[in-house]
Image (tube, helix red, strand yellow):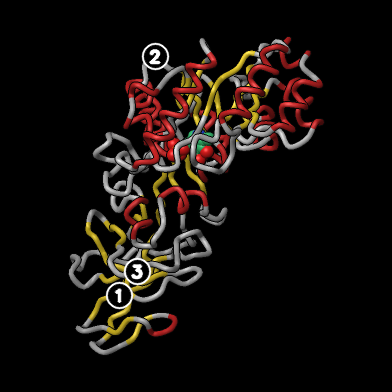
Amino acid sequence: MNAITKRQPRVELSTSALQHNLKCVRELAPQSKTICMVKADAYGHGIEFALNALQDTDAFGVACIEEARQIRQLGCSQPITLIEGVFNEAEWLEASQQQFECVVHQQQQVDWALAHPQIYQQNNLKIWLKLNSGMNRLGLQPDELLKAAHQLRAAGFELVLTMHFANADVPDHPLNQQQIQTFLNLKQQLESIEASCCNSAAIFNWPELHFDYVRPGIMLYGASPYSDISAAKLNLRPVMHLKSNLIAIQHVKAGQVIGYGSRFTTTRPTRLGIVAMGYGDGYPRALTHGAYVSIHGHEAPLLGRVSMDLLAVDLTDLPSTINIGNEVTLWGDNPSVDLIAQHNNTIGYELLCRLTNRPKRIIF
Ligand SMILES: Cc1ncc(COP(=O)(O)O)c(C=O)c1O
């Protein structure tokens, strides 16, 4: 038995996996520039880590100016695109000076651009004009977009036509073709305009739509953009490995209940492993039956409810050499974060983003 000297939940982050996944994007979309999406603290992986590992990218994509400022302060010199654009006139001026390219998705943003074109244009920044092609989240309707494009071009702005898919993860969804047709139609009407519409799933689905820039997010981090195709099948490598250790073992008889709410009753004499990991670390509480952790290559099913700092796993069918102090993988190669997400009725994106800062980050 190994002595436990401290609580050890940790997030191990693989630089080489992140770089491998970026290489996959490059191979899939060799003619396009890559905008690595690093919003939400690089999908929960830590912005500084991601910036260092993704030096090879053409640009970074963030949600808002606060995130862009942060990555400039960390020394990033690549172009940065604000995918929600600016929220007021002062932000427009700051973006112009700091060389942040802006998405424009509503008329007010067009007006700020028209009022202050000089610095933005002197810095050779393009405006990303966002089409609402059917997702009905952000974007101008086709007629509004044509009007804005004419106004902005007349004022000397260079434009990129952009949109976002609502169902790229379901390639056969009928809305995809509708969105594509609307986009292509506008692209044709606007003649010789740069274009960008592909997130991770779209990069896999539609090579013919890669255009000038692709915008991968989840695939960079080695999780799958699809619910029915694993990341491993897509040749992606998990960047984040959530780990901890076994800190106690209980031997319980058949008919005993385990954990808060006594939600699980043992049906046989059970060797129970207690792992130092809980929802206070970001591991999901609402797991449905069937999730597991891996310990030295063996799968150990979760039993009972996940609590704030601890969870219980069934070691009964594992070798008896598995013991206190052994390393436990909560997600990484096996199980994948996508599998744990499925058992939690959510997607890998959410689990990655909602880790807390309690587990120690270790970069390797
Ligand atoms: C506009 C835009 N482009 C690209 C992405 C990246 O998407 P994904 O993580 O599915 O690759 C996102 C993510 O939400 C987005 O909002």
Horizontally, residue 142 falls left or right of residue 274, namely: right
Amino acid type for the residue under numbered disc 1 = Leu
| Mark 3 surroundings within 10 Å by alpha-carbon count, few (fewer than 14), some (14 through 19), many (20 or more) | some
In which image quadrant can residue 41 be found? top right
Label 2 SS: loop
From the top left corner, tell me how far across and down residue 104 is, in percent.
Answer: 65, 29
| Mark 1 surroundings within 10 Å by alpha-carbon count, few (fewer than 14), some (14 through 19), many (20 or more) | many
Q: Which mark is residue 31?
A: 2
Seen at 28% across and 57% down, the residue is 294
In which image quadrant can residue 346 be found? bottom left
* Residue 70 visible to an observer of this rendering: no
Amino acid type for the residue under numbered disc 3 = Thr
Label 1 SS: strand
Horizontally, residue 318 falls left or right of residue 204, namely: left
Label 3 with label 1: CB-CB less than 8 Å: no
User: Earlier along the polypeptide chain: callout 2 or callout 1?
Assistant: 2
Horizontally, residue 286 falls left or right of residue 126, namely: left
The foreground one among 183 and 315 is: 183
Q: Which mark is residue 272?
A: 1
From the top left corner, tell me how far across and down residue 114 is, in percent.
Answer: 77, 20
The foreground one among 228 and 270 is: 228
User: Earlier along the polypeptide chain: callout 3 or callout 1?
Assistant: 1
Measure how far apart labels 2 and 1 are at the Cα level.
53 Å
Seen at 63% across and 31% down, the residue is 82
